[in-house]
Amino acid sequence: MIIDELGYFPFDNLSANIFFQVISKRYEQGRSLIITSNKSFTEWRKIFGNEVLATAILDQLLHHATTFNIKGGSYRLRKKQKAGIQPAVINR
């Protein structure tokens, strides 16, 4: 299973619990899982809205995991930036 862009939108309570069940089942069965996210692990509490649940998910995910931290600019914006087009800046 591949989950791309985890944390792009926060999970509501029901979705977070279902996600935990999926992760737990795959962990128990020793099934492969790839997750991409531009959020650090410390931000996962905000994604799931529950620190205990986020910790439980991370505990299972990281137990047998190999993690890669890729730093740098957006790959998708590279061509536009080379052409001199600057990305919009959004102040929140």
Image (cartoon, rainbow, N blue to C red):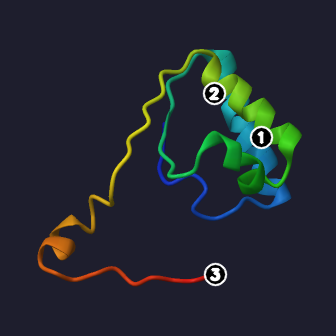
Please name which of the two marks, 1 or 3, marks the residue nearer to the observer: 3
Image quarter for residue 77? bottom left
- Residue at x 69%, y 31% (from the top left corner): 58
> Is 46 drawn above or below residue 78 in the view shown?
above
Q: Under tag 2, what secondary structure?
A: helix
Number of marks drawn: 3
> Is 16 drawn above or below residue 26 in the view shown?
below
Q: Position of residue 8 (x, y in %)?
A: 57, 62
Residue pointed to by mark 1 = 54
> Is 30 drawn above or below residue 51 in the view shown?
above
Q: Residues within 10 Å of mark 2 (few under 14, many from 20)?
A: some
> Is 16 drawn above or below residue 28 in the view shown?
below
Q: Is residue 7 left or right of residue 11?
A: left
Which amino acid, by three-letter code, is at mark 2? Leu
Q: Residues within 10 Å of mark 3 (few under 14, many from 20)?
A: few
Which amino acid, by three-letter code, is at mark 3? Arg
Mark earlier in primary sequence (1, 2): 1
Residue pointed to by mark 3 = 92
Q: Under tag 3, what secondary structure?
A: loop
Mark earlier in primary sequence (1, 3): 1
- Residue at x 59%, y 45% (from the top left corner): 40
For the C terminus, which image quadrant? bottom right
Which amino acid, by three-letter code, is at mark 1? Ala
Q: Under tag 1, what secondary structure?
A: helix
Residue 38's mark?
none
Q: CA distance from mark 1 to mark 3?
A: 25 Å
Q: Position of residue 70 (x, y in %)?
A: 38, 41
Q: Are marks 2 and 3 in contact (CB under 8 Å)?
A: no
Foreground: 13 or 52?
52
Q: Is residue 9 left or right of residue 16?
A: left
- Residue at x 16%, y 69% (from the top left corner): 79
